[in-house]
Image: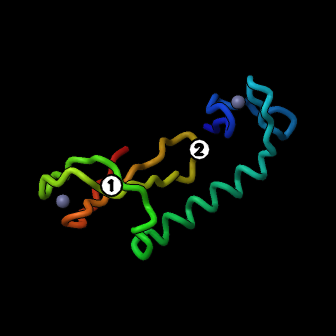
Amino acid sequence: MLFCDKCGNLMMPKNGKLHCSCGFTQEEGKIKDKKKKIEEIAVVENNNIEVYPKMKYDCKNCNHTEAYFWTLQTRSADEPETRFFKCTKCSTVHREY
Ligand SMILES: [Zn+2]
Ligand SMILES: [Zn+2]
């Protein structure tokens, strides 16, 4: 599913474009490019982990309460994105769906 950049509402495809109830439209092709970028970012996660935002997260391994956070969109738009948390203390990666 695709959401409006402007207001976050669900966008409806029409004539090769995506339309939002707020009046915002987006080319479908541009969205595909964006998705590709997200996948590229996910691939380099281990080298550049410092760039990810830190979030409150209860590590199941060491009970630390802070972890780096990032998401990975699977190829199918119907599937929900996978969320990853990497403990800032013990570096254990936790996955959530
Ligand atoms: Zn909108
Ligand atoms: Zn930990």
State the quadrant of the C terminus: top left
- At x 59%, y 44%, the residue is 77
Which mark is on residue 4? none
Mark 1 in CB contact with mark 2 (< 8 angstroms): no
Q: Nearer the viewer, residue 20 or 76?
A: 20
Observer-side mark, 1 or 2, equals 1
Which residue is label 1 attached to? 85
Amino acid, disc 1:
Phe
Amino acid, disc 2:
Ala
- At x 14%, y 57%, the residue is 61
Q: Looking at the picture, does residue 21 appear above or below residue 42?
A: above
Residue 25 pos. (x, y %): 80, 36
Residue 19 pos. (x, y %): 78, 31
Relative to residue 78, is residue 63 drawn left or right?
left
Which residue is label 2 attached to? 77
- At x 42%, y 49%, the residue is 82
Query: Within 10 angstroms of label 2, few (less than 14), some, or many (20 or more) residues?
Result: few
Q: Looking at the picture, does residue 95 appear above or below residue 40?
A: above
Residue 75 pos. (x, y %): 56, 53
From this viewpoint, which residue is outermost toward the bottom? 47
Q: For mark 1, give the secondary structure.
A: strand
First reached walking from the N terminus: tag 1 or tag 2 = 2
State the quadrant of the N terminus: top right
Relative to residue 22, is residue 87 drawn left or right?
left
Relative to residue 35, is residue 12 drawn left or right?
right
Q: Nearer the viewer, residue 63 or 37?
A: 63
Q: Nearer the viewer, residue 40 or 53?
A: 53
Q: For mark 2, give the secondary structure.
A: loop
